[in-house]
Image (spheres, rainbow, N blue to C red):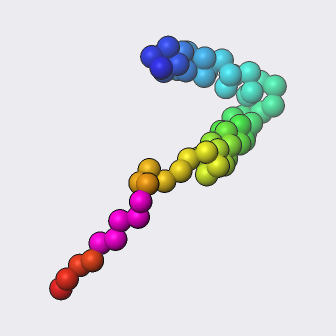
Amino acid sequence: MTIVWSVGPIIAPFIGGYLQKNFGWQSNFYVLAGYSALLLISEFIFSGETLKKEILLILNS
């Protein structure tokens, strides 16, 4: 994980510059939106509830 967190800020400007030069400055936002949508869909598909049983809270007032 340390390598991934270290390499990300180094590589990101190169990828952003490539996208901007070849596809225009808006392409950076399209790529980020697509990546975010992919992560959101993956989260819904592969993530589950962490609590195995349902806990009911009854508040007496």
Q: Residue furthest left?
A: 61
Residue at x-position 73% and y-position 28%: 20
Magenta stretch prevailing secondary structure: loop
* Residue 1: % across, % down: 48, 20
Q: Quadrant of residue 8?
A: top right
Residue at x-position 43% and y-position 54%: 52
Q: Residue furthest right?
A: 22
Whether residue 36 is visible: no
Locate the C terminus and report the quarter of the image it occupies. bottom left
Looking at the picture, tell me which residue is in the foreground, 28 or 55.
55
Q: Residue furthest front?
A: 53
Left or right, 34 with reference to 43: right
Residue 60 part of the magenta segment: no
Magenta residue span: 53-57
* Residue 42: % across, % down: 64, 44
Q: Quadrant of residue 57?
A: bottom left
* Residue 47: % across, % down: 56, 47
| Residue 16 drawn above or below residue 32 | above
Whether residue 1 is visible: yes
